[in-house]
Image (cartoon, rainbow, N blue to C red):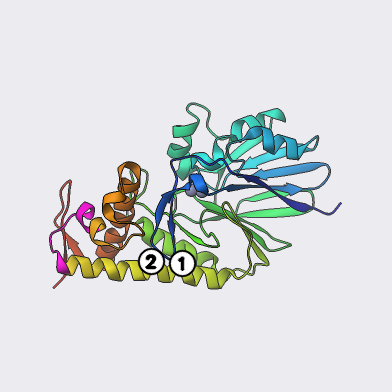
Amino acid sequence: MEARIERIWSPRVGEREVLTDDGEHEVGVSEAVEANAWLIGDDEEVIVVDPGEDAASVLEQVGDREILAVICTHGHASHVAAAIEVAERDEAQVALHRADRLLWRAVHDGDDPEIEMADGGLFDVADVQLEVIHTPGHTPGHVCFIDEDSRRLFSGDHILPRITPNISLNQFDAEGPLAQYLRSLAKVRDLETSEVMPAHEWRFRGLAERVDGIAAHHERRLEELLAAIVAHPDSTSWFLASQLTWSRSWDQYNGFLRVSAVTETAAHVVELVERGLVTSSGGDVPGYRVVG
Ligand SMILES: [Zn+2]
Ligand SMILES: [Zn+2]
């Protein structure tokens, strides 16, 4: 029986995730952004990709088919909150990359995923084989899945059609999340793909073009940041964030929005340091200046 792909659209998205608009550097909580869950399978069995927050809507769409596994592109709550409830119905296993375990535990304390995914891992459902591609950056354990036959890429939050995913320096990340992210973009850029199935917004074609657009966005942001460091030597990430262009005035960025803007700026500052263009004063609240 021929496999098919179904999209479950959920307008309810957790408040913790921040997405940056490519065109205007807009930072906004993703309440206004829907999330996609994907079902892959046939009339007998399915795999659920990124169940989202609402188990009932996923289970309704699955119907009486058997759930073989619930596989998660990354550990953000808006994509994994319903994972256990969906998997439990058929005693299926949940799969997540180990590097997103801390994010997962912030949502599901004490109930870890049974399957630890790694690059090159495979899942079978109906006549489909999905391969795991580790794409750290948006989160340390982010993965994409490629359907080896139809060449559809399930891209999670790694690549979205319009929004640039948030890349932040945070407590879970190793050094240099932006460097990791740019490497992960290059890793998938030239994959033969028929279509990209993201975790937000809509499915699209033209992977390489979109990858180039996102990479160019980050390069422009790095240039803007470098100019701000030249103008304000020994500044902190907190101050530098206030010097960048955002879609609203900096005064309107309060609370979580402001923290997100600062952690995103910090990820870009670290990238400038790793490229040898900027040095850090060190310490708990480092200041930065241009080399030379
Ligand atoms: Zn995410
Ligand atoms: Zn997301």
Residue at the (24%, 63%) spot, across then down: 273
Tell which residue pokes out farthest to the right in this image: 1
User: 40 or 15: nearer the eye?
Assistant: 15
Q: In the structure shown, which secondary structural element does the residue marked by tag 2 occupy? A: helix
Is residue 234 within the magenta segment?
Answer: yes
- Numbered badge on residue 281: none
**Mark 1–mark 2 CB contact (< 8 Å):** yes
Disc 2: which residue: 218
- In the image, the segment drawn in magenta is 231-240
Q: Position of residue 240 (x, y in %)?
A: 22, 58
Callout 1 amino acid: Ile
Q: Is residue 276 visible?
A: no
Disc 1: which residue: 214
Callout 2 amino acid: His
Query: Quick one: quadrant of the C terminus?
Result: bottom left
Q: How crowded is the residue under tag 2: few (<14 C-alpha within 10 Å), some, or many (20+)?
A: some
User: 256 or 270: nearer the eye?
Assistant: 256
Q: CA distance from mark 1 to mark 2?
A: 7 Å
Q: Position of residue 147 (x, y in %)?
A: 68, 58
